């Protein structure tokens, strides 16, 4: 029987409320130092009973949707796992839980993972979920093209956050030097939308699922997420290195379950499962919002929940480059320090040979 700890106050907006990069590295380093002598890894899982605490970096977003589908569709249970979701308010809190040993597997952002690894947290992204800049670039109607953004205000959540890094990457990719705009920390998705509505800022990255709200408020989508081909890796499955080494079969079972979920998300025969999952975990406020979310998650592209779970290596390199510019603590990191796709590759090989990894059918 799978169990889920649901948030007491559902959050529908994307919440990339990471700390400023330098401050976050320092804070995480203190946690790592404090936890360095603790060898107890029981918080992450129990191979005997299949019990697993699964961390979610931000609640109420589609970033970690394959995990929700794996839970709702019984894919975790099929793998013998008793999964309990634990939600965190930010990517920094999520990574801190790895340092303490409370969580050893979960859904996180590449940017937070990089900052955590720089602070001494030993974890890797094993499976990719959103293999793109999974934001709409939303602007004030007076912004006709990218050059109009020079000298204007651009909203992010926090300095060093995923939205900060993504904003800088998308600006540079479209010919705008981030130094030529006024980047402002305003908060989460709702706060960034409000800053646009009130004219405090003229651009922000927003969840595509909020597109109908954007249009209702007279704002413009300068670049839709599905047309954004800038290399990036927004989110994926993050696993503690010690867990990969000491309980590899349980970690492999998690990977198999979320790969099945990724297949189910794009399977038209699983539409009811996907819509049920949207209602249960993303809690749309209207039928139009639910339809918009379904259209986005089920689009079937290679960058939104790819069924092979690939990690966009070029995208990770882009994040590492910008992270290194913002915070010297991350400057020496390489892709190998934050990515290990061996479990995903093994699961795909097993499924191809008739093993236990295939099939997207949900339990009835």
Image: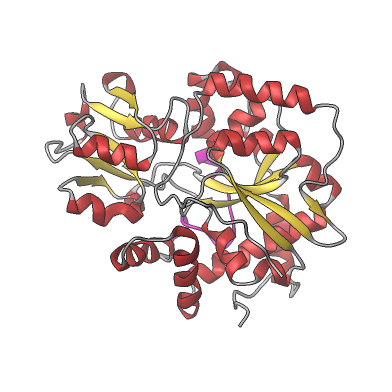
Instruction: Between residue 322 and residue 297, name the one nearer to us.
Output: 297
View extreme (front): residue: 8
Q: Does 206 sit left or right of 323 as displayed? A: left
Residue 332 appearing in the image = no
View extreme (bottom): residue: 364
Q: Main secondary structure of the magenta part?
A: loop
Q: Residue at x 63, y 60 (%)?
A: 4
| Image quarter of the N terminus | bottom right
The magenta span reads: 301-315
Q: What's the colour scheme? A: secondary structure
324 relative to 208, above or below: above
Instruction: Between residue 333 and residue 257, name the one nearer to us.
Output: 257
Q: Position of residue 247 (x, y in %)?
A: 83, 51
View extreme (left): residue: 142
Q: Position of residue 314 (x, y in %)?
A: 52, 40
View extreme (top): residue: 328
| Image quarter of the C terminus | bottom right
Which of the 4 image quadrants contains residue 300? bottom left
Q: Does 58 sit left or right of 222 as displayed? A: right
Q: Does 353 sit left or right of 327 as displayed? A: right
Which of the 4 image quadrants contains residue 292? bottom left
Q: Is residue 92 magenta?
A: no
Residue 120 appearing in the image = yes
275 relative to 84, above or below: below
Please tell me how many numbered marks the rendered image carries. Answer: 0
Q: Residue at x 23, y 47 (%)?
A: 221
Q: Position of residue 111 (x, y in %)?
A: 53, 35
Q: Residue at x 74, y 72 (%)?
A: 356
Q: Residue at x 57, y 43 (%)?
A: 88
Q: Position of residue 316 (x, y in %)?
A: 54, 38
């Amino acid at each position: 029987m799978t169990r889920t700890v649901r948030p007491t106050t559902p959050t529908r907006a994307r919440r990339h409320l990471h700390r400023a990069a330098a401050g976050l590295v320092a804070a995480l380093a203190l946690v790592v130092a404090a936890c360095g002598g603790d060898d107890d890894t029981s918080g992450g899982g129990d191979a005997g009973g299949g019990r697993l605490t699964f961390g979610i970096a931000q609640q109420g977003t589609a970033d970690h949707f394959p995990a929700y589908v794996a839970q709702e569709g019984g894919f975790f249970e099929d793998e013998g796992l008793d999964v309990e979701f634990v939600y965190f308010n930010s990517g920094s809190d999520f990574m801190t839980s790895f340092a303490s040993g409370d969580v050893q597997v979960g859904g996180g952002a590449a940017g937070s993972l990089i900052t955590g690894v720089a602070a001494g947290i030993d974890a890797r992204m094993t499976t990719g979920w959103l293999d793109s800049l999974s934001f709409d670039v939303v602007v004030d109607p007076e912004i006709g093209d990218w050059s109009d953004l020079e000298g204007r205000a651009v909203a992010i959540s926090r300095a060093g956050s995923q939205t900060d890094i993504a904003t800088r990457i998308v600006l540079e990719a479209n010919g705008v030097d981030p130094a030529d705009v006024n980047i402002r920390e305003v908060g989460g998705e709702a706060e960034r939308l409000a800053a646009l509505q009130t004219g405090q800022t003229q651009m922000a990255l927003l969840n595509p699922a909020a597109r109908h709200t954007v249009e209702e408020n007279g704002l413009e989508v300068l670049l839709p997420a599905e047309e954004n081909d800038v290399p990036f890796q927004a989110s994926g499955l993050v696993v503690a290195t010690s867990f990969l080494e000491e309980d590899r079969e349980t970690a492999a079972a998690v990977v198999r379950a979320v790969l099945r979920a990724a297949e189910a998300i794009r399977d038209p025969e699983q539409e009811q499962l996907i819509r049920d999952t949207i209602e249960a975990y993303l809690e749309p406020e209207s039928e139009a919002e639910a339809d918009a979310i379904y259209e986005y998650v089920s689009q079937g592209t290679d960058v939104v929940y790819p069924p092979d779970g690939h990690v966009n290596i070029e995208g990770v390199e882009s994040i590492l480059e910008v992270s290194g510019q913002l915070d010297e603590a991350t400057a020496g990191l390489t892709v190998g320090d934050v990515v290990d796709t061996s479990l995903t590759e093994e699961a795909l090989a097993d499924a191809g040979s008739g093993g236990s990894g295939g099939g997207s059918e949900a339990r009835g």
